Image (cartoon, rainbow, N blue to C red):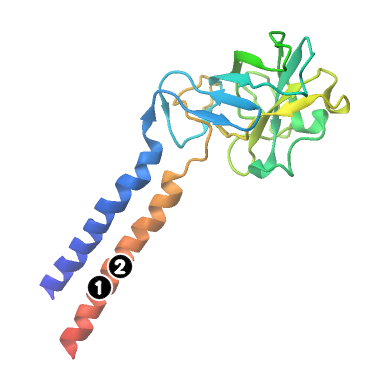
């Protein structure tokens, strides 16, 4: 029986030795990471932890590729908005309810083809009481899943003008000080979500092995 228990524990340990390095590679430090869609690229600066949200107060670099929507514009505004579940269907449709005017910056370096060279933008977990003095029931709400965030880049007149594009969805975690502490790459925090089920599988597999050995021994 003792030998069977040892085999079960060895099996579980071997399983973890194989899968956990695969899981936690998603949370490894990296010098720079990007999120992008067909128009916008968001890049981190310095060392960040891959597979974790941006940290509130973290500054990223945003650039825009050539596009017909912004071509000919002399300036645009950038707002941080909510994009529930990070889906195209839930992209913001109202500046008042979906975007935070406190996060607005103006960008004037726009090329004739609509492209915009990289510029700095600071992201926040919203609503934000530290920097903006917003209450907990303020809108928009964006941070971590399912309350994803997205950048609006377009005319200052907002959605009615029709001249705007969106960046890729991203997530931002609170840190209590808006210091950008423990910066991430803007993606969901996946290691724990994946690692715990795998740990359960390993333990369960070891227990199943042990029960089978006991039954075989009894018969």
Q: Is residue 174 visible?
A: no
Identify the residue shown where x is 68% and y is 42%.
Answer: 84
Are dots 2 and 1 in contact, CB under 8 Å? yes
Residue found at the far bottom of this picture: 219
| Image location (x, y in percent) of residue 5 | 17, 69
Q: Neighbour class for label 1 at 10 Å: few (<14), some, many (≥20)?
A: some
- Residue behind mark 1: 209
- The residue under the point 52% across, 40% down is 188
Secondary structure at badge 2 equals helix
The residue sitting at the left extreme is: 3
Residue drawn 58% across the image and 38% down it: 144
Place of residue 92 in the rendered image (x, y in percent of width and height, measured from the top left)? 76, 35
Q: Which residue is mark 2?
A: 205
| Residue 89 falls left or right of residue 194 | right
Q: Is residue 90 above or below residue 204?
A: above
**Nearer to the camera, 152 or 174:** 152
């Amino acid at each position: 029986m003792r030998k069977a228990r040892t085999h079960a524990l060895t099996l579980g340990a071997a399983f973890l030795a194989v899968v956990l390095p695969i899981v936690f590679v998603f949370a490894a430090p990296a010098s720079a990471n990007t999120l992008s869609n067909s128009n916008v690229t968001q890049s981190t600066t310095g060392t960040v932890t891959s597979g974790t949200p941006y940290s509130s107060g973290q500054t990223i670099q945003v650039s825009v590729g050539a596009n017909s929507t912004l071509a000919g514009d002399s300036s645009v505004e950038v707002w941080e908005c909510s994009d529930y579940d990070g889906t195209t269907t839930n992209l913001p449709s109202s500046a008042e309810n979906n975007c935070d005017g406190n996060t607005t910056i103006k960008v004037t370096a726009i090329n004739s083809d609509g492209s915009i060279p990289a510029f700095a933008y600071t992201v926040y977990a919203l609503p934000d009481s530290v920097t903006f003095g917003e209450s907990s029931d303020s809108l928009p709400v964006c941070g971590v899943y399912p309350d994803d965030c997205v950048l609006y880049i377009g005319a200052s007149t907002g959605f009615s003008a029709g001249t705007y594009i969106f960046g890729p969805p991203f997530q931002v975690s609170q840190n209590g000080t808006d210091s950008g502490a423990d910066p991430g790459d803007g993606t969901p925090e996946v290691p724990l979500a994946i690692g715990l089920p795998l740990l359960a599988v390993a333990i369960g597999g070891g227990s199943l092995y042990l029960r089978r050995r006991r039954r075989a021994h009894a018969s």
